[in-house]
Image (cartoon, coloured by chain):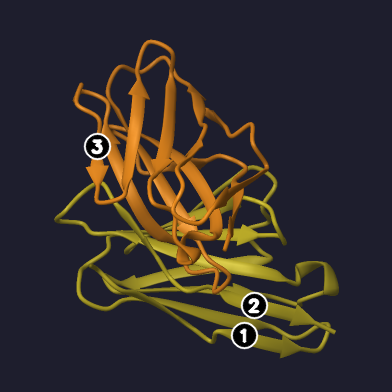
Chain colours: A orange, B yellow
Amino acid sequence: AQTVTQSQPEMSVQEAETVTLSCTYDTSESDYYLFWYKQPPSRQMILVIRQEAYKQQNATENRFSVNFQKAAKSFSLKISDSQLGDAAMYFCAYRENTGNQFYFGTGTSLTVIP
Amino acid sequence: GAVVSQHPSRVICKSGTSVKIECRSLDFQATTMFWYRQFPKKSLMLMATSNEGSKATYEQGVEKDKFLINHASLTLSTLTVTSAHPEDSSFYICSARDTLAGVIQYFGPGTRLLVL
């Protein structure tokens, strides 16, 4: 099975500041997908951003962007201009191109300080 | 975006009873749905992959006779926890993949099960 590692169990950021959440993964595949999901206190999983491994350009969604380093198997999430509503658990996930299964990291709990 | 619903959102039952949880894709067809279990402040643990019209594929360590999965239509999968015990208390989340749109999994809001 693939492994996804999030080495930061907890992170905090001042409101309006920038924070980066780390994720590394292990795979022998060359074609796959990476995701960041957010799980607020409601526990509804919400897709934040996704990256196709074949794309060199880093994905961006408004205040959220990724730093995808394929050779290093690293996929970090940058949240700019942090808002109180960004407080949540963030899960990094991996999916093979030909498979269905998602492999999730252990999550990072993000606190936003007013 | 696509919507997945789960019902009930929370349930309390007595030990020994069975509980059924429904997962529906509301605006897309889902050949494949997934059932996860999540303990407090932990990651999602995949229990099984539900395939429309065929048997579910269970992850290692998950008892198929304990957690019955039925995926009778392209929009509905059910998870039945049979003879529930307190250790089955958990948060259960389903997700579905849009058959026509590929990659993304859309998650339901989850069901909190408490077995007394």
Contact, CB < 8 Å: mark 1 with mark 3?
Answer: no
Give the camera-side residue of B83 and B107. Answer: B107
Q: Identify residue for label 2.
A: B112
Using a 10 Å C-alpha cutoff, classify the residue at mark 2 as few (fewer than 14 neighbours), some (14 to 19) or many (20 or more): some
Q: Residue furthest left?
A: B100
Question: Label 1's element?
Answer: strand
Residue type, label 1: Arg
Where residue B73 appears, x then y in whole percent? 29, 74
Q: Identify residue for label 3.
A: A59
* Real-space Cα separation, disc 1 to disc 3, in angstroms: 36 Å
Chain letter belonging to callout 3: A
Q: Identify residue for label 1.
A: B10
Q: Quadrant of the N terminus of chain B?
A: bottom left
Question: Label 3's element?
Answer: loop
Residue type, label 2: Arg
In the image: residue A70, left or right of residue B12? left
Q: Quadrant of residue B52?
A: bottom left
* Real-space Cα separation, disc 2 to disc 3, in angstroms: 34 Å
Residue type, label 3: Ala
User: Against B65, is A73 above or below?
Assistant: above
Where residue A93 appears, x then y in whole percent? 45, 41
Viewer-side label of 1, 3? 3
Circles 2 and 3 on the same chain:
no
* Real-space Cα separation, disc 2 to disc 1, in angstroms: 4 Å
Give the camera-side residue of B68 and A27. Answer: A27
Chain letter belonging to callout 1: B
Residue occupying image coordinates x 32% and y 40%? A65
Residue occupying image coordinates x 63% and y 66%? B67
Q: Residue furthest top?
A: A71
Contact, CB < 8 Å: mark 2 with mark 1?
Answer: yes
Question: Label 2's element?
Answer: strand
Viewer-side label of 2, 3? 3
